[in-house]
Structures are given as structure tokens and as C-alpha cells.
Image (cartoon, helix red, strand yellow):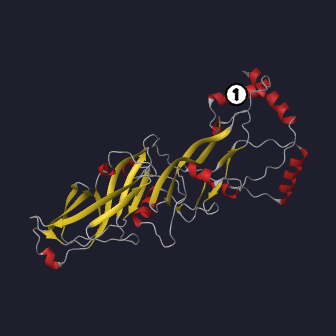
Amino acid sequence: MVFIETVLLIIITTRVASLSPLAVPIPTPALSEDHQMAPEELLKSFGLSEPGVRRWYSEPPQYMLDLYNEIADSNGLTRLPGPYGATIVRAFSEKDGSRDSVFSFSVTGLGADEQVLEVEFHVHYSRLTKAERHLLQDNIYMIEIHWVKERGHQLLVKEKVAAHSSGWRVFKVGRGIVGTSALSEYDQRRVTLEVTATTLTGDSLPLRLHHGVHGPRQPLLVFFSLHSSGNNTITAPVSIPEVKKEFESPLANRVRRSLHESFPRIPQGCVRRDMNVDFGTIGWSSWIVYPKSYNAYQCTGQCMFPLGQNLNPTNHATVQSIIHLSGEFPDVQRPCCVPSSYANLSILFYDAEENVVLKQYEQMVALQCGCH
């Protein structure tokens, strides 16, 4: 063992001494500064066929903003799974045809591989008047949600409501309203719901419901889904400590520069460096709500022997590095410096139909680098 270690040490010393000086590495530009990057290809990587659309006066529903802040941190890194374990949440605003107690939605954008887990109907309503409350027994009344279809109505929800209640109410209407046939990305399906209120004895009550495509009280039909063929594992972000630079005196700086000029520069090892993606620079800031940018990071440098445990080397990479170092097999290259762990990214955006979507993308941020 001592002999082998001595031989490897001699080889390493010889290799280092024979290295030619390397130029000072030029900082890699941020992804947003690469003018050769095609936004169309980047769209495909986000699972989109076309950019989203957002009118200047449009504001995302408060529910979607709150949900984003709940499952993602300030950098957009996913920290919690979505409701029902969903990785995609789509909020559909009501369309033409809504009136009084009838709410109409146009469901679009669902992928063929998207599995709907649950559907919620969010509606804002006002409290019953004093005269109407006198008609109730035990200060309770009933709310029913009906699915309006071509061949009649189907009861989806029936709940008891307190007489003095008001504000937002969420009804689980079930994934059955999607239908039996799968929707493609370009398909459109109209979903119409009717809300009725009655006393416990069946007498009708004039419930005041709020409508509107925009504004803080706009009704929503919210779809919770995930990719049926994908991996739904949520990787929690790992905090990586910052390396603080120690103060160097002018004399130390001169000595360091002299050493760099006198001796060959050793290639930089495998490290994680910044790679900033700025949606504003590529023209997406109008329809991507959050985050406006994020640091995807990149892994650069060479995997030099011996591979430290901080580089998370595989057994294969360790053997490959030793064979490469021996020089007996010129075709054997060094192991590659690549991401060894990732974090998921949550993005809140408008799709091409002006619906607000919250989607989790897997393995979007490199947390650590390793030799593989």
C-alpha cells in the first residue's frame, strides 16, 4: 500500500510540474446574457409551446400568490409539495356566460400526461340579510353546487352553511368534471356550475354571489394535478454555507501574484458557480409572475486525482481518475464535473389563455457539484 501511494505521489508531482501555465479563467456569463440562446428552445424545456399572455391590468388571484409563497422560498426553490401532492396548480377565471348563480369556465392547457387529482371551486358570497336569516331553522341553510351539462344537472356538493357566514368558500367538486376523455394541450372544455341556496325545508334563498374576471373577488375553478409519467419527489433545498474571504495585506497580494507568475497554474477543481437566469432579459417578465430570476448554478472545473469526498465521487469516477492518471490508456478521460444534487423550482406564470399556473419543475437548480 505504501509503495502504491509513493508511486501515485511521484506521478502526481511529475504531472503537476509538467503542466503549462493556464490563462486566468474568464467568468462565465449569466444565461440571460447569452445572445445565442433561443427562447423557443427554453420554452420547450419548461414544457410550454408558446409564451404566456398577461394584460397590463391583470393581477394574479390572491389565492395563487398565497399558495406560491407557501410552497416556495424567496428564490423560487420548492420547499413544500402542493395541495393533494400536486406539482401543477391551474386557476381558471370565469368566462362569458356567467350570470347570477351560474359560473362558466373554459378549461384549457391540460397536458395529455397530466393526472388531475382534485378540482376546487372558489367563490365569494355575501351574508344573508336579517329578514332572510329569520326564515332559517337553527341559523343554518344549505348550499348546493350543480354541474350543468347538456343532458341535465348533476349534484356535486351539498353543504350546510352558518347564517352569519360570508366571504370565501371552497368546494371540492371532484375531478369527474374533467370528463372521461383526455385533454390535449390545445383542447378546450367548458365547465358550467350553478350555485343554489335553500332552507333546511327546501325553500329557495337569494344568495348573493360575486362575479368578475379580474379583481380580488373573482371566482376560480382550480385544478390540482401532476405529470402521470413523472417523478413527484420533492427535493428540499439545502443551504450551502458561503465561503468568506479573509483580509489580505498588500504585501500578501504581491507575494501571491509573484507565485502565480513564477509557477504553473494548477487547473481549477470541480466547483459550483453562478448561472443566473433572468426572465426579463429574455422577454418573459410580462407573463412570469414569480420568480423574476433565479440562480440555476453550473458545475465547472476539472476532477483532479485524488478525488475528495467533498466532490461526492462515485466508485466508477475514482477508478476512472486513477486509470487516467496512469497514462497507460490515453482514451480514458478525467471524470466529469457535474451536479450531484438538485433543488426543484416553482414558477407562477400566465399561460397562453391568460390562466394563472403554478408549476413545480424538477432538478432545476444545482445544489452541489461532484465528479462522475
* x and y percentages locating residue 330 in the rendered image: 79, 26
Q: Is residue 351 left or right of residue 335?
A: left
**Residue under circle 1?**
320
* x and y percentages locating residue 52 in the rendered image: 52, 60
Name the residue rendered at 53%, 63% in the picture: 287
Q: Is residue 343 left or right of residue 96?
A: right
Q: Is residue 5 left or right of residue 167?
A: right
Q: Is residue 21 left or right of residue 99?
A: right
The quadrant of the rendering that contains the N terminus is: top right
Q: From the viewer's perspective, is residue 79 above or below residue 232?
A: below
Residue 143 found in image quarter: bottom left
Please tell me how crowded label 1 is: few (under 14), some (14-19), or many (20+) other residues with Cα within 10 Å: some
Depth check, front residue: 98 or 156? 98
* x and y percentages locating residue 192 in the rendered image: 30, 60
Amino acid type of disc 1? Gln
Depth check, front residue: 104 or 120? 104
